Amino acid sequence: MLLFGKAGLCLALFSFLALESAPVCCPTEDNPHSFKIRASALFPQGGIVRKIYGHAFPEGSVEYDYNWRHFSVFVNAAATGKSGHSIGLRDSTTLVVVPVTIGMNARFGSSWVHPYLGIGIGAAYAHIRNHNSFVPKNSNKGGFASLYQAGIEFDCNSWFFIDLFFDYRWNWFDFNKKASRQTGGIDTGLGFGFRF
């Protein structure tokens, strides 16, 4: 698995260095729509979140893109969750975060390699379940979400592609009316997509 990760990273770096000077996004002309399923690891930025829930969260997301020339409009929906222990009493707690973002990507590439950069904004939902008698057992909050995307799509054929991505998520929730809790962070992983 480690070897595959290094090989994928080398392939991504080589692809960036070997791009043609004139971008050509050939799949978007015949198949402007794409749908992808992505699996990733989210590394939270917030120190309190890391202290309670750990340094990495599993995350799954789905994304729809409408491609037009060298741009695409996307809708991304993700879900991540992790169990941990409260600071001090060490009672068990679970955090689930669901962000949904809408945004735009700028696309580049050769005939089969398509790097992209983008930004999106939206809303997020957080659910916290605590097993501590001093705080509410269930807390639900709505908040703000943003997504900054960077990735490379590798075409397998005219319909299927692989998406290697490195994103940054920023989710903001006002849990106690006085301070925010930042549950976003670096999000990196692999996706599989279909153009239609």
Image (spheres, helix red, strand yellow):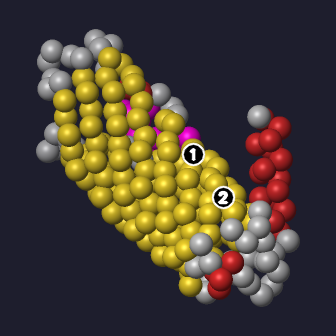
Pointer 1 local density, CA inside 10 Å: few below 14, some 14–19, many at least 20: some
Q: Is residue 100 left or right of residue 137?
A: right
Q: Where residue 15 sits: x, y (%)?
A: 81, 65
Residue at the image position 62 percent from the left and 48 percent from the top: 189
Q: Secondary structure at mark 1?
A: strand
Q: State which quarter of the image contains the N terminus.
A: top right
Dot 1 or dot 2, earlier in sequence:
1
Which numbered marker is on residue 163?
A: 2
Q: Where residue 106 sits: x, y (%)?
A: 58, 77
Q: Where residue 145 sits: x, y (%)?
A: 35, 57
Residue at the image position 16 percent from the left and 39 percent from the top: 176
Residue at the image position 80 percent from the left and 84 percent from the top: 21
| Quadrant hosting residue 136 | top left
Q: State which quarter of the image contains the C terminus.
A: bottom right
Farthest top residue in view: 89
Q: CA distance from mark 1 to mark 2?
A: 10 Å
Residue 31 is at least partly visible in this image: yes
Which numbered marker is on residue 146?
A: none
Question: Is 101 one of the magenta-colored residues?
Answer: no
Q: Is residue 81 left or right of residue 57?
A: left
Q: Which residues are magenta?
A: 41-50
Identify residue for label 1: 39
Question: Is 48 one of the magenta-colored residues?
Answer: yes
Amino acid marked by disc 2: Asp
Mark 1–mark 2 CB contact (< 8 Å): no
Amino acid marked by disc 1: Ala
Residue 87 is at least partly visible in this image: no
